[in-house]
Image (spheres, rainbow, N blue to C red):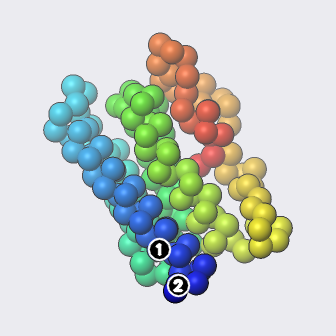
Amino acid sequence: MENNEERKLLDLRVESKAYAIASIKLYQHLTEYALKKEFNLSKQYLISSTRIGDFIRQDNNLEAYYSASSAKYWLELLYNGGYIDDDQANAMLEYCDPLVRILYVISHPEARKDKDTVRTQPAATQVSSSFLAGSSATASGTNPFAQKGGTL
């Protein structure tokens, strides 16, 4: 029977692969099927989001964290630029946010209060409200990045 650490690693591998596959589908949509096609930002997003799993497999959790944070940044730019809507952003954030949080704790042991409690990222990684003020919130007035705490 596998131990708890092996199970967590397996879960990270499974989650990062699921996120990579969803990111590939979003990239295909943005470059082939969307009314407003986008190639540059979506390529950067694709690279960052698929590298997460690669770094996890290499047991390089710090680089995986950096890639997850980068993927979230590119996703936010796609949203702010009006290339993806609330539903698309929320779907991708459901994959990305947990990976960012978990990889932060794994790669920054000093962020742990104890073995069972997880602290949040430092304030320096918080997106300012003035940055989000320029976002392209839809007619519903919601901003998925503000709802998710706006952390990068």
Q: Residue at x 63, y 46 (%)?
A: 151
Mark 1 lies on residue: 10
Taking the view exactly as shown, the residue that stands out farthest to the front is 1
The image position of residue 74, as x and y in percent, is 44, 46
Picture layout, residue 30 above or below residue 23: above
**Residue 44 seen in render:** no
Please name the residue shown 71% across and 56% down the image.
121
Q: At x 43% / y 70%, what residue is drawn?
A: 13
Relative to 4, is 28 on the left or the right?
Answer: left
Q: Which mark is residue 28?
A: none
- Tell me, yes or no, if residue 111 can be seen here: yes
Instruction: Tell me the residue that label 2 is attached to.
Output: 2
| Residue at image location 21% in from the left, 25% down from the top | 35
Q: Is residue 20 left or right of residue 93?
A: left
* N-terminal-most mark, 2 or 1: 2
* Few, some or many residues within 10 Å of mark 1 (<14, 14–19, 20+): some
Pick the residue in front: 151 or 113: 113
Amino acid at circle 2: Glu
Label 2 Cα neighbours within 10 Å, binned few <14 / some 14-19 / many ≥20: few
- List the single residue furthest toward the top: 139
State yes or no: discs 2 and 1 in contact (Cβ < 8 Å).
yes
